[in-house]
Image (cartoon, rainbow, N blue to C red):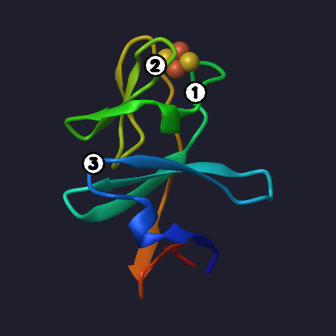
Amino acid sequence: MARLCASADVPEGEVRQVDLGDGRVLAVYRLDGAVFATDDLCSHGDASLADGEIENGQIVCPYHMGTFDIRTGEPTGAPCSIAIRTYAVVEQGGEIMLAP
Ligand code: FES
């Protein structure tokens, strides 16, 4: 399983960018104690979602303030209309990893 970061790197209600070094750059979130991951790149433009704010389970893109549901990747607010990819993650022994 690919390690993303330490559990402590993603406090409740926050998001962190993780570069896997293989071309994939993810945004890793913690919501209500659970960890989620999506592509970091907004589907609307060249913005890092990890630089955005979390509001009601959604990530607000810092560029045009479009939003995505963190759990599903579905766009929830204009101008975003294309879903971002989500990744299954597991948290174990103080580490956050991509699920196999
Ligand atoms: S780049 Fe994200 S909403 Fe435009």
Q: Which residue is mark 1?
A: 43
Is ligand 1 less than 8 Å from the beta carbon at label 2?
yes
Q: Please give the count of numbered marks on the rendered protein.
A: 3
Is the residue marked by circle 2 packed among few (<14), some (14-19), or many (20+) residues within 10 Å? many
Q: Which residue is mark 2?
A: 80
| Relative to 55, 50 lies left or right | right
Question: Decide: marks 2, 1 in contact (CB < 8 A)?
Answer: yes
Counting residues from the N terminus, which is met first, the one under dot 2 or under dot 1?
A: 1
Residue type (three-letter) at the residue carrying disc 2: Cys
Residue type (three-letter) at the residue carrying disc 3: Gly
Check the image and report above or below for 37 versus 65.
below
Question: Decide: marks 1, 3 in contact (CB < 8 A)?
Answer: no
Q: Which residue is mark 3?
A: 13
Dividing the picture into quarters, in which one does residue 2 lie?
Answer: bottom right
Residue lying farthest front?
8
**What is the CA distance from the residue labelled 2 to the residue labelled 1?**
7 Å
Is ligand 1 less than 8 Å from the beta carbon at label 1?
yes
Counting residues from the N terminus, which is met first, the one under dot 1 or under dot 3?
A: 3
* Residue at image location 43% in from the left, 75% down from the top: 90
**What is the CA distance from the residue labelled 1 to the residue labelled 3?**
22 Å
Residue lying farthest right?
22
* Residue at image location 47% in from the left, 21% down from the top: 62
The C terminus - image quarter: bottom right
